Structure formats: C-alpha cells, structure tokens
Amino acid sequence: MSGFDDVLEDDGTGLWRWCEQTDVLEWSPAMFALHGRPPVAGAPALDDWLPQVRASQHAGDGVGEFASLILDGEQGCVTRTELIVLCADGIERHAASTVRVRCATPGAREVVGTMRPIFSTPRLSVEHALKESRAHVERVRTAESLRTQTQELEAAQTLANVGTWVFNTETGAMRWSEEMFRIHGLSPETFVPTVASAATVIVAEDRELVERANKSLRTKPRIGPYNYRVRLPSGEVRHMVGAARLIRNSDGLGVRILGTALDVTSRVELEAMLLHAQKLEGLGRLAGGVAHDFNHALTAILANADAALLDGASGVEEELREITHAALHASELTRQLLTFARRDVARAQRIAPNDIVASLSRTLGRLVGEDVKVAIRYGTPSATVLADPGRLEQVVLNLVLNARDAMPGGGALTIETSVVDLDAAHVARHVEASRGRHVRLDVSDTGSGMSEETKSRLFEPFFTTKASGVGTGLGLATSYGIVRQAGGHLTVESHEGVGSTFSVILPVASEEAVSLATAPRARARKGGNETILVAEDDLGVRRVLLRTLRTLGYTVLEAVDGLEAVERARTHDGPIHLLLSDVIMPQMRGPDAARAVRELRPSIQVLFITGYAGEYGTAVWSEGPVLGKPFTPDALASRVRELLDGEGALDVGAALDSDPKNDDAPPT
C-alpha cells in the first residue's frame, strides 16, 4: 500500500487512507486480516465501510462517532479511541484506532488512520492473551471512570456558566466546549472557533484588553481573571470573566492554551441594581437630614411671622405674608424630600388602585391635552393595597404629567392595572422587590423615550431633563419614595424613540392589614390653662413652642432633652397634662422619654413633633400622635386642644398630618 510503512504491521496494526477528491479508501494487508476480508476483494468504499465500524461504548462521549472523526475532524487533529469492527465472518472485534486529519479543506480532505487488534492473535501465548485481556478490562474500567468524570465536569460547567476552550499552538486549531457555544449564543454547526472568529464576538472596546492578556502567556504560566464583554447575535451584551494557562510538553515547550470563560452577567446586573439602590438610599439619608434641619428653621420662620402679624406690625404686613407664603412653599419642597427619603408620615389605608385611576379618569383629558389619546384598562377590581390614597394619587398624576411632557407632539397614553405574582426571577432583577401577589399599575406613553444614562438617574432628587425653570426634578423622586414607603417598587422600561412604561408594583394587602383612618380636625385657635411639658433640643423651635403655648394661656415647663423631661416630670409638684416632645433628641429620644414619663404620670397625654417620624413608624405612633414640622401656631394650638379635650387622643390617624395652609394640616 503506497505511502504506508508496512513494518508497522508486524504487531497486527493495519493502516488505511481516504482521499475525498478521489473518494478512494486504501487498506494495508493487516486491515484486510482484521476485517476478515481477502485482499483480492479490495477495500470497500468509505460509505460501505463506516456502518461496519462504531465507537466502543467504553470509549467515552468525548470521542464521538468514528464517521464524524473522518468527515468533520479539524486539520491536524489526531484522535485515539477504541472501536468495534463488524467482520465479514460476523464476528465483532475490538481494535485500538488512531485517526489523523492531514487536510481538512472541503472537497480535498485527506484522512489517515491505524487499527490494531486489542485481543490476542494466534501468535500470542495463552498467558499473554490472558494478560492482555486483563489489561483490556482495566482499560475499560478506566475509560468508564473518565467518561463519568467528564460528564460530571461538563454538568458542573453548565451549572456554573463556565465555558472552556483549547488552542493548539502547533496547529493553530481551537476547540470550544458545548457551554462555550451556549454562553455566546452560537451553534457548532454555523460557527467555527478560531482566534480571528473568537475575537469578533468580543465587544470592540474590550478586544485589545483580551489580546494583551493572552499575549502575556509568553512570560507567565497563567493569566486572569480579567473582565470583558461579548455581544451575542441577538445584540445582547454579556459580561465575562476569563482566565487561561499554558500547557507544556515534557520538553517544556508550550503546546496548548487552556482557557475558561465565566458568564457573570447576572452578578454584574445585580451589583449595578444594588449600587443604584444604595445610591438612592444615600441620597435619601442626605435629603432627609437636610429637610429635617430645614424644617426647624421653617417652623421658627412661620411662628415668628405669625406672631408679628398678630402684634400688628405696621407697614410690613404684606412682607410678612410673603415670608409666610415662601416658607410654606419651602415646606412643600422639604415634604417632597422627606417623601423621597421615606421618612415622612403617611396615612396608610386599604385602597383599590382601580378606584384611584377611576377618580382621576375624568380629569386626564384636561391634563394631557386633546392631542394625546388616553386609554384605561382595569384589572381585578377587588385587589387592594395598603397605602396613602392621596399620595398614591400623586404618584399617578406625576407619571401622567411625565408622560405628557414626553409627547409634545401628541401620542397615546395608556393606564393599566393588573394583579401579578412576582417570582424569584423578577426579584433577582429588582433588588427592592419581594415575592408574592402584587397589584401592578402601568403608565405607558409613545413619547421620545430615554437613554440608559437618563434611566440610571431617573429617581434622583432634582435631576431633570427639562429646561431650566421648568419643574423642580422632584416629581419622580417623590413618586419613588411614596411607592417604597408603601412596601412596593417602581420600575421603568424605555427605549429612545419608542416610548416608556412606568410600573408601580405594590403588595396586595393582607387580611390582617389595619387602616389608619382620618378623623375630623378642628380649625379654631383655642388655648387653656393646663400645664404642658415641652421637650425640644433645637433652641429656635423650643422658643417658638414656649412663646406660642404661653400666649395661649398654658403653663409651660421647659426641657432641652428627654432625660431632663423625665426629671421635670418627677420633680414638678403640680399636675402635668401634656408632654409635647421632639422625636429625635440627644441623651434620650422622645418615645423613650414618653414611656418613662407615663410611668410617673399615667394620665398624661403625649404629642410628638418631628420632621420625619415616619422612620419610626408605629414605634412612635403607639406612644402618641405626631405633628409634622414645619407647622403654624394654629396647627399646634389645634392639636394640643384636641388631646387635652379628649378628642382624638387615642386616634393615631387624626394627628398624622397637619396643614399650615388650613390651620391644621401640612402641605402635600
């Protein structure tokens, strides 16, 4: 047989060669002996021979079928495996095989191989045959163990989203694992991995980084981890972590590069969401702290302006009213900041979002204009949530106005409610979400949409894309705070030129949920002769409280913090009818001071004043009602009189809100 060294046939090894261009299969004499065929018959055609040869069941899944080794193997690829040969006499013989692809060019493929009988030949002794049989059994067991380990390794790689690749430095051939193809959204049938083709799937900005890392293998035994991105055929971008090491032969020469690619897209997205949530939380704390201190100043400004008006300051009445008006406007901004920070007081009750949308439906046309078509779709009517009705209405209005501004040339606005079950996948995408049944309220528009950069800052206070002087940038930030305070979360889907969909997602109210009702509120400023203990650490606010209460006829005891308030309650000889206390004070906070004072004087009434009592929730409300800062003297007088007269003394909701504009409720 031309081109083969027949000396190799002394141990029974047969040689063969197939050329695609001539479609001729050549066999050496030992090949005919192995197959039980006389040489005079000639070698069969390739298509007739392949059905007679199959991979041994012990060879392992990584070997593949014998035919695929010949027809699909890469150039330079050398594969060794065990085969089962169906001979002409009907006997199956086991053989050790080597297949080498000399040329892989389509239409000109050339493949050569060897086959050596595994079991004994007539020339072998019985002892030798038994020895080789035992060795074969051991090889079979080893192959089975390797096959199992390979399967377990491939399964582990799939679970961990780890793909592997091997690059042959001698032949330039590259091989990808199945998981590598899956991660990149590619198919082995349509994508041939090479150094050049693998580079094309990497995001252009990251190619130099990956190339530089791989080149460093010339001086380093291993590289990584290094981060890069790949772009799938669908356009999706995945985040990867790569690593590689150089495999050397016995002479110390590098022959292969083994690399891994770990898909960390989910982790990167989760980290981004967590960082965004932490950023908003940090902004909330900053906004809450600023608003709290600002409310102290506003309380003093409102009280002093009110006192000057009552004294009849001649010639400056108009200026004092302007000061009051400006302070009330500033208090609205601080209230929005506190709502964003989720530190404002809210009156939660069981409500149906369908009812909120229905109450606004009559005014939507006037809000958005005649060139915007409005469609409303109601979901399950009985689904309720636990939230402040007025503030949830404010959220819907903010989203509607935001949609209108995104459609200056007209368009379509859709409001839709539904009940959804949030699963683990949704919670994984939104760190603020929780699993279970939720009411979803979508506000969609066909406007200009938003860029990724705009979406990343959407809920930051004072961030706006509108022209200077148009809006404060607090609308969406306030909506975010309201929804989060109600236990829900706010999501947005938007694409430039397509439109946006804002989704308010709130948990369905449980059967045990308790609503905080609102009681009628008095309006007249009335005083009395009772004794009131005032505990307030801010000097300006404390002076306002002392002057206002004494002007109304009350006897006032002064304390600069909670500890001093408890001491005054212990040492005062006469009765004390009301404790008026700030929530946050040094030494001892208001709720702790209230409990200590009640142990000394069980019949005393308690009224808290604070800029952000909502942070303490029912822990404050259980000790007494709350008057939010800033407040006017009228609002303070009204609340104090309600409690002393026994009206709403046990009604938390009656005192959860106050408004300077209406004498007893803060602006909303």
Image (spheres, rainbow, N blue to C red):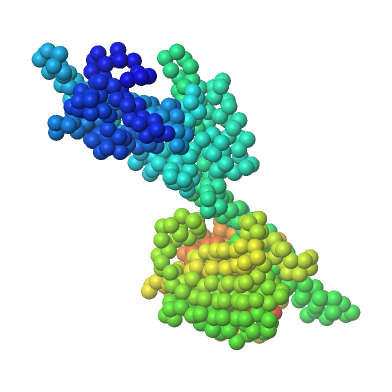
Quarter of the image where one finds residue 399: bottom right
Report x, y in % for residue 562. 58, 59
Quarter of the image where one finds residue 541: bottom right
Looking at the rendered image, the quarter that the N terminus falls into is: top left
Which residue lies at the image location 61% right of the left edge and 35% below the top edge? 209
Left or right: 657 as drawn, with respect to 111: right
Report x, y in % for residue 142. 24, 27
Residue 38 visible to the viewer? yes
Which residue lies at the image location 39% right of the left edge and 43% below the top edge? 158
Looking at the rendered image, the quarter that the C terminus falls into is: bottom right
Report x, y in % for residue 427. 45, 58
Left or right: 638 as drawn, with respect to 99: right
Residue farthest along the bottom direction in this orientation: 362
- State the residue in front, 274 or 137: 137
Residue 140 visible to the viewer? no
Which residue lies at the image location 25% right of the left edge and 20% below the top edge? 29
Report x, y in % for residue 73. 40, 34
Residue farthest along the left direction in this orientation: 126
- State the residue in front, 454 or 661: 454
- State the residue in front, 205 or 526: 205
Which residue lies at the image location 60% right of the left edge and 38% below the top edge? 207
- State the residue in front, 642 or 275: 275
Q: How many marks?
A: 0
Left or right: 473 as drawn, with respect to 607: right
Residue farthest along the right direction in this orientation: 315
Instruction: Indicate whether 121 appears above or below 572.
Output: above
